[in-house]
Amino acid sequence: MLAKRIIPCLDVKDGRTVKGVNFVDLRDAGDPVELAWNYSQQGADELVFLDITATVERRKTMVELVKAVARQINIPFTIGGGINEIADADALLNAGADKISINSAAVRNPALIDELARAFGVQFVVIAVDTRVIGDKNIVHLNGGRLPTEKQTLDWIIEAESRGAGEILLTSMDHDGTKGGFDNGLLKLVNDTVNIPVIASGGAGSVQHFVDVFQQTNVDAALAASVFHYGEILIPDLKSVLRENNIEVRV
């Protein structure tokens, strides 16, 4: 059985790590380079770095900051934000990324997924999906959750997989930052439907929430931000509890 992964996420704005609730009311959470080093030491399995305003501000990801983070860690590193073409991904790969995460650009130009998968390999391409319930449907949102689309979440994820996505990073905006637990119903539906790894994101508030998401949905990984940034959950303690619940994790 493959070990489940624990992934801290650095949401970066103006060179600082930030965290909000339901994608708004952002507050400072520290220096991304220091946090990255700390998570690498604690035993995080991977690290995700999202330049959360790059798309809205129509600029590229902060390559120098990415390089500074990459120098501090020895775990797989995923970068997202402002990636619109092959050249952007290439620059981040050269700066130290192991994988890139695309969201808005992929929805606007789905063929970009095919191009990236062909250029770099499927394992390099993570499709991030920000979803919120509107009416009775899960709807994909763009621009850091600011813009609802016409796309239903499961349909879009199926298309992304067919085009060459190697992994899905699924964030429930309704659960994000609430610390009320992951959206296990949606995560199970998606994980049962696709054949690529799914990363759960949005809602982690306790160690039990991680136990629940792995036991109830069988996703491959769980991602969180504020509970790690503010020291509410330490990764070694989390992994210890997961092992006690017969959930395979890397020590």
Image (cartoon, helix red, strand yellow):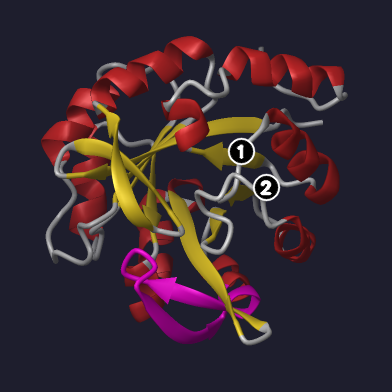
Using residue 181 as the reference point, say whether residue 74 is left or right of it: left
Q: Residue 243, can we see it?
A: yes
Question: Where is the N terminus found, in terms of image quarters?
Answer: top right
Q: Residues within 10 Å of mark 1 (few under 14, many from 20)?
A: many
Q: For residue 202: magenta? A: no
The x and y percentages for residue 101 are 39, 52
The x and y percentages for residue 135 are 63, 87
Using residue 181 as the reference point, say whether residue 64 is left or right of it: left
Q: Tell me if residue 217 comes above or below residue 8 in the rendering.
A: below
Q: Residue 250, can we see it?
A: no
Mark 1, residue position: 205
Residue positioned 19% across, 24% down in the render: 68
Residue positioned 75% across, 33% down in the render: 208
Mark 2, residue position: 181
Element assignment for label 2 = loop
The x and y percentages for residue 139 are 55, 79
The x and y percentages for residue 203 are 59, 48
Residue positioned 50% across, 46% down in the render: 123
Q: Residues within 10 Å of mark 2 (few under 14, many from 20)?
A: many
Using residue 146 as the reference point, say whether residue 170 is left or right of it: right
- Tell me how far mark 1 sits from mark 2, CA to CA: 6 Å
Segment tinted magenta in the rendering: 139-156
Q: For residue 148: magenta? A: yes
Q: Are marks 1 and 2 in contact (CB under 8 Å)?
A: yes
Element assignment for label 1 = loop
Residue positioned 67% across, 50% down in the render: 182
Q: Tell me if residue 215 comes above or below residue 140 in the rendering.
A: above
Three-letter amino acid code of the residue under disc 2? Gly
Using residue 160 as the reference point, say whether residue 104 is left or right of it: left
Q: Nearer the viewer, residue 168 or 55?
A: 55
Q: Quadrant of residue 29?
A: top left
**Dot 1 or dot 2, earlier in sequence:** 2
